[in-house]
Image (cartoon, rainbow, N blue to C red):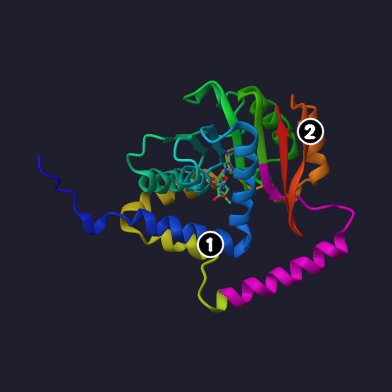
Amino acid sequence: MADTTDTTTRPDWQAWQRSWDRQQEHYLPDREERFRTMLDVVEAAVGRTPRVLDLACGTGSISDRLLTRMPDAHSTGVDLDPALLTLARGHFADDKRVEFVRLNLRDADWTDHLPHRQYDAVLTATALHWLTHGELVALYGRIAGVLRPGGVFLNVDHMPDPTTPRIDELMAVHDRARRAEEKERGVLDWVDWWRALEEEPSLAEVVAERHRVFADPAKGDHAADQMQSPAWHVEVLRHSGFTEARTVWASPRDAMVLGLK
Ligand SMILES: C[S@@+](CC[C@H](N)C(=O)[O-])C[C@H]1O[C@@H](n2cnc3c(N)ncnc32)[C@H](O)[C@@H]1O
């Protein structure tokens, strides 16, 4: 039967993926460097055909970089946000190397709903600061539970050092000035980007659903005031079943920690 779908109302998935990436780069100008470092570690530790769990995947940017660099890899993307998952599924269309599952990382049994029992690598970027530190301790234990021996976990996120408030403030002032200049040039920030997505006719409903989910603190609200230092993450990983853990990348404000199972 002929496809009668009205293509004029179908979102341009690739354009939304690019615009998500640009919005994230507004906050993280070195975002691609983070992904590259992450995949360097994956390649070194588990090779070029890994089964990866892209945790709090958003639109699937990590999966996208993974599959571009390692075409024989496989990825499972997990997120709670129905709108970002819709963009991810649209972007990857019928690509059999990736699947997306809607799960809440705060739930005790979320790993039971994954399509695979074991992964070679669990990767996550700019997401786990949404959880409280108690939730993160529990999550790190569950991540260790789905990694095979020799597998790796990498988390790159905001990880301030509580001993350097003056340095942090200097860098924050500098970053605010950069973002203000970008905004002048029309770059969309988080709020602008979500407003733009609301304007996409076929996505209005799923964006409204997303706002309902994240308005409920029990389900999805941000715990950004609970951000922990790299040393804290490393210590928790060592107590969560990882044989070795340490920082493998850092910027003036953020860091990437690696746990080796
Ligand atoms: C800033 S975005 C980063 C997305 C992606 N990792 C990237 O780098 O583009 C943070 C992501 O964390 C997800 N998230 C927050 N809390 C979550 C939870 N409890 N369970 C699953 N995903 C969650 C959000 O929906 C969002 O997609």
**Type of amino acid at the residue the image marks with label 2:** Val
Indicate the secondary structure of the residue bearing disc 2: helix
Q: Residues within 10 Å of mark 1 (few under 14, many from 20)?
A: some
Residues at badges 2 and 1 in contact (C-beta under 8 Å)?
no
Alpha carbon distance from label 2 to label 1: 31 Å
Residue in the picture at 32% in, 55% down = 11
Upstream in sequence: badge 2 or badge 1: 1
User: Which of 153 and 203 lies nearest the eye of the viewer?
Assistant: 153
Residue 171, image x and y in percent?
77, 66
In which quadrant is the N terminus drawn?
top left
How many numbered circles does the render carry?
Answer: 2
Residue under label 1: 23
Determine whether 42 is above or below 166 in the image: above
Give left or right: position of 17 versus 129. Answer: left
Residue under label 2: 236
Per the image, is 175 magenta? yes
Residue 176, image x and y in percent?
69, 70
Q: Residue furthest left?
A: 1
Give left or right: position of 1 versus 193. Answer: left
Residue in the picture at 75% in, 71% down = 173
In which quadrant is the C terminus drawn?
top right
- Ligand 1 closer than 8 Å to the CB at disc 1? no
User: Which of 106 and 46 lies nearest the eye of the viewer?
Assistant: 46
Residue 40, image x and y in percent?
62, 44
Residue in the picture at 51% in, 43% down = 66
- Start-end of magenta stretch: 155-182
Residue 211, image x and y in percent?
49, 50
Residue in the picture at 35% in, 59% down = 200
Give left or right: position of 58 versus 6. Answer: right
Q: Residues within 10 Å of mark 2 (few under 14, many from 20)?
A: some
**Type of amino acid at the residue the image marks with label 1:** Gln
